Amino acid sequence: MVKSRTRPKELLLDIFASLPQGQHISAQELRDRIIGQGGEVSLSTIYRALERLSEQGEIRSIMSARGQLWEAVSGEEHHDHLICTKCGLTIEFHDDLLSGFGQTVAERKGYIYQESRFDIFGFCKDCKANLDSNTVSQVLQSLDNVSTLLDEGKRVVDAGVRSLMSDKDRSVAASIERARKLLQQSVDECERALDALEEEI
Ligand SMILES: [Zn+2]
Ligand SMILES: [Zn+2]
């Protein structure tokens, strides 16, 4: 049982020390943990303690799809973050290219380089796959609609051609016959596109 007189800063440091490497945690999650241990603390107290710990260089924050997250700064190797803005998946990585980039920019602007940190935002592999298949389904749906409309148009023109033929108005009949052929080609083209897309997914 955590006694409520324990200072929030120490409670937080304990929690950060217990987090597995690479785990990032929000202020709300920190509060939930303290309450789960029988402690009592307000969110604003947590925020104040986080600010102080961050100023002291004990922790640092990253922005993510879940809002602001925090992690302990230990002796661990410098790392940057890849953050999925859809599901919040956050991956830590190290790439000399990025630290070299930070140094180059600092020096060009006349700064003495100390360190740099990059939070790179995007869609993770799973979220990208979901987006891709959503797009394909949308295109399929549109093509399906176009194909139905074209089919309907063709039937109307067919009926027109039949009635004109009986009226013996050959020249109008010929141009409508041409329109009918173009419609048929469009329907065929749509069906080919649909078949190709359906094979893809
Ligand atoms: Zn990290
Ligand atoms: Zn994702």
Image (cartoon, rainbow, N blue to C red):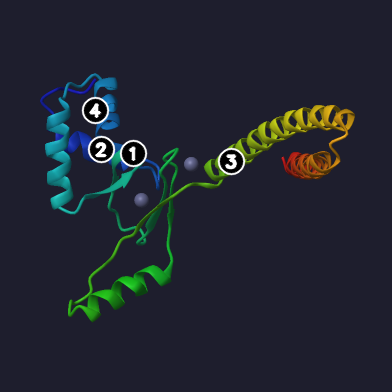
Q: Image quadrant of residue 19?
A: top left
Q: Which residue is mark 4?
A: 31
Q: Residue at x 10, y 25 (%)?
A: 5
Q: Are marks 1 and 3 in contact (CB under 8 Å)?
A: no
**Tag 3: amino acid:** Thr
Q: Are marks 1 and 4 in contact (CB under 8 Å)?
A: no
Left or right of residue 2: residue 79: right
Q: Which residue is mark 2?
A: 14
The mark that comes first in sequence, 2 or 3, is: 2
Q: Position of residue 6 (x, y in %)?
A: 13, 29
Viewer-side label of 3, 4: 3
Left or right of residue 88: residue 71: left
User: Residues under labels 2 and 4: Cα distance?
Assistant: 13 Å
Q: Residue at x 81, y 45 (%)?
A: 178
Q: Position of residue 88 (x, y in %)?
A: 41, 40
Q: Are marks 2 and 1 in contact (CB under 8 Å)?
A: yes
Mark 1 C-beta closer than 8 Å to ligand 1: no
* Residue situated furthest front in the rendering: 168
**Tag 1: amino acid:** Ser
Q: Which residue is mark 1?
A: 18
Mark 1, Cα crowd under 10 Å, few <14 / some 14-19 / many 20+, is: few
* Quadrant where the image shows the C terminus: top right
Q: Residue at x 29, y 21 (%)?
A: 36
Q: Which residue is mark 3?
A: 135
Viewer-side label of 2, 3: 3
Helix, strand or loop under label 3: helix
Between 75 and 141, the one nearer to me in the picture: 141
Helix, strand or loop under label 2: helix
User: Residues under labels 1 and 4: Cα distance?
Assistant: 15 Å
Viewer-side label of 2, 4: 4
Viewer-side label of 1, 4: 4
The mark that comes first in sequence, 1 or 4, is: 1
